[in-house]
Image: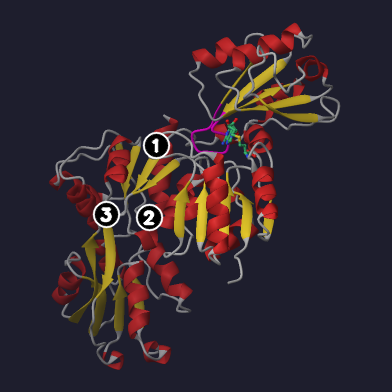
Amino acid sequence: MTAGRVYLVGAGPGDPGLLTVRALELIRSADVILHDKLIPWEALRDARADAELIDVGKIGGGAQVPQDVTNALLVEKAQEGKDVVRLKGGDPFVFGRGGEEAQVLRAAGIPFEVVPGVTSGIAGPAYAGIPVTQRHVSAAVAFVTGHEDPSKPDTMLDWAALAAFPGTLALYMGVKALPRIASALIEHGRPADEPAAVVQRGTLPDQRTVTAPLGELPDVAKAAGIKAPAIIVVGGVAELHDEIAWFEDRPLAGRSVVVTRAKAQASALADRFRSLGAQVIEAPAIGISPLAVDLPDLSTFDLLCLTSPNAVDRLFELVRDARDLAGLRVAVIGPGTAAALRAHGVEPDVVPERFVGEGLLEALEGVEVRRALIARARDAPDVLPDGLRERGVEVEVLTTYEAVAEPLSEAVRDAALAADYVTFASGTAARYFLDAVGGAAPSGQIVSIGPTTSGVLREGGVEPDVEATVHTPDGLVDALLADAAR
Ligand code: SAH
């Protein structure tokens, strides 16, 4: 059997956006992935469903898997003919033992490739507004392991040389050792008043940075409760944090936000919150299940009403020939549904100003309609069909899909109940979420997209703290931002 290939891949420091294109490509195709603890968990989301994922970062939450066990696994899996991705935090060759693994693979005659990653010693400071080099401030940077105890005689590090190093020091793994590192550097001549910083969980949504003169940094970091993983930066560049910090300044930095929409729709809203700095918890207690229906002859209708993006997508699964829609006036409930329709190449004729059933009825006032088809979810409110019938319109309701309950894992449920904000973009999402948490009350602020959703929440015994004035996902985001700024 020909041996598989091993890829020593860097996964970056934590922000999944900092995975390289090559890393993602290899994750998607790997037979086996051996990964560390310090990798973005999202990195594994794209692995094949049948890929074997092995956590070699820890054993059952406890000790690290010994390096020789990892080495043996790499060789063994490759010899079984499998393509193996060895996924490591940051860069595989920067304090990642990737070099040792390459040596083992070469000795065993197994072909390998190395995919560099974004290293935390550069990225953490960068996300804290600290460039590791800067003209007129620092013309060199040294990456140093802070793992070694500077008081031990057998240290590999020459502290005198490091103290004298003419540039920035980026120290990895040094939180516990910070007091000893700071004193060793100062003892060997580094000025105690030199700017320094610690960046905890760099590039992750809950990143924190503290800055202080080197001599005071251990106390300041301790008072702030700084923990691993963290990068220590020593050098004039650390001062630039005050001037050009950006990541921690975003409006929702340090806040957690729950998105309760169905998976298919959640990502746009989740991305909005993420880009505003929030830590997003996706809690899709609701899924979309298509229903088998026969589409009636569309040429017998003069109005088609669509009240959700899902209804639009489902309709286009059912329409065999787009020209069947040619003679129809199409009304949608709001901008989201309009966008979904445009994505299928159809321009809506009617978009109301208020994005609720009543608003659509108002918008249709004065429009001459004989027969209307409403394609929608099971259990959608009857405001629209009832209102049209009252006007003498012949209405056919076509139920094309239904919402189904999706169980939430215990971890997601706990995280959602403890989050700073829980957002509800529809009454259905609200109902299913409340069911999934089994009556437990979220401790954070409850944000509702509008009156219908708020009504469902109140029925479930939950009083919304914030209700959007514009009943769209954008309106929901704006309402949450306004609350966060208070
Ligand atoms: N190969 C990795 C480093 C592995 S050593 C890289 O290139 O980044 C582990 C140390 O890296 C941690 O103790 C910590 O000092 C640092 N580290 C890793 N991820 C980090 C993060 N997101 N923020 C701050 N430091 C991090």
CA separation, marks 1 and 3?
Answer: 28 Å
- Disc 3 marks a residue whose amino acid type is Ala
Type of secondary structure dominating the magenta stretch: loop
CA separation, marks 2 and 3?
Answer: 20 Å
Q: Which residue does the image show at 39% across and 56% down from the upper left?
A: 266
Q: Which residue is mark 1?
A: 61
Residue 319 is one of the magenta-drawn residues: no
Q: Which residue is mark 3?
A: 285
**Sequence-wise first label, 1 or 3:** 1
- Disc 2 marks a residue whose amino acid type is Thr
* Mark toward the viewer: 1 or 3: 1
Identify the element where label 2 is drawn.
loop
Q: Which residue does the image show at 38% across and 87% down from the upper left?
A: 325
**Quadrant for the N terminus in the image:** bottom right
Identify the element where label 3 is drawn.
loop
CA separation, marks 1 and 2?
Answer: 42 Å
- Please tell me how crowded label 3 is: few (under 14), some (14-19), or many (20+) other residues with Cα within 10 Å: many
Comparing 14 with 65, the one in front is 65
